[in-house]
Image (cartoon, rainbow, N blue to C red):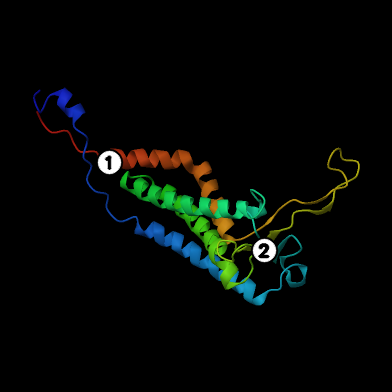
Amino acid sequence: MQPDSPEASFSQPLRYPARRGSVLPFFLLALLIIGIDQLSKYLVHKHMQPGLAGEIPLLGNWFKLHYTLNPGMAFGVELLPPPYGKLLLTAFRILAAGGISYYMVYLWRHRAAAGFIACMALILGGAVGNVIDSIFYGVIYHNAPFGSPTPWFFGQVIDMIYVDIYEGFLPASWPLIGGKYMSLWPIFNLADSSIFIGVALILLLQGRFFKQTEQNTAAAAPASEPA
């Protein structure tokens, strides 16, 4: 087979020039999210009382700071009964953070859109922010639930952002849910917000991200050598 034959060109993998810059700024963005998240949780724990006693209205009664502890998943959702749910959640978050980190490097090397990698950095920062709570807060802030086998890995996540769209008893005339007490929005933190924003932006802008990735790849494709 001749080196310049069509068969040879398909059998040889294309070699693209290295991408300029570095993936490091995206990891710094994740680190910034982690720092802001941890600072907000420290300030809430240091200067606010838990529950209604320490609640601080910011915009009327519908947007407040409300210090509460969350033993479960993001937005207060629990997976399994304790202690197995907590351990499973923490292990999943650690694996997810490692997987996202690897995926960000992969995306950078394959010339993915910078906006898409930034969204992954937001998700990574939020995931690691809540992992820190789960692993260390039982020791640092002594907030592991009563009966936990160890304070390590059983720390509760600090939540504080409360968007109070509706809270109260539903009309008794409503079928199935009538007369029940309901709050239409959970209390969350900046790490949860970062994850939500990252996922939402990917869903909203995925077409633009994929188009930009194709343009980046096409621009880096080596020119065909003359016969």
| Residue ID for mark 1 | 219
Q: Residues within 10 Å of mark 1 (few under 14, many from 20)?
A: few
Which x, y percent locates residue 194? Answer: 54, 56
User: Would residue 115 be visible to someone looking at this image?
Assistant: no
The quadrant of the rendering that contains the N terminus is top left
In the image, residue 23 above or below residue 223: below
Drawn side of residue 122 relative to residue 108, left or right: right
The quadrant of the rendering that contains the C terminus is top left
| Residue ID for mark 2 | 145
- The image's mark for residue 130 is none
* Real-space Cα separation, disc 2 to disc 1, in angstroms: 55 Å
Residue at the image point whose x is 33% and y is 40% from the top: 215
Q: Secondary structure at mark 1?
A: helix
Q: Quadrant of residue 71?
A: bottom right
User: Would residue 52 be visible to someone looking at this image?
Assistant: yes
Residue at the image point whose x is 33% and y is 45% from the top: 111
Q: Amino acid at mark 1?
A: Ala
Q: Quadrant of residue 174?
A: top right
Drawn side of residue 77 relative to residue 112, left or right: right
Which x, y percent locates residue 21? Answer: 29, 55
Which x, y percent locates residue 155? Answer: 60, 64
Instruction: Looking at this view, name the residue that lies furthest to the bottom.
Output: 47
Residue at the image point whose x is 44% and y is 60% from the top: 29
Q: Is residue 164 or residue 205 the one in the foreground?
A: 164
Q: Residues within 10 Å of mark 2 (few under 14, many from 20)?
A: some
Which x, y percent locates residue 13? Answer: 21, 34
In the image, residue 139 above or below residue 3: below
Instruction: Looking at this view, name the residue that lies furthest to the right.
Output: 173
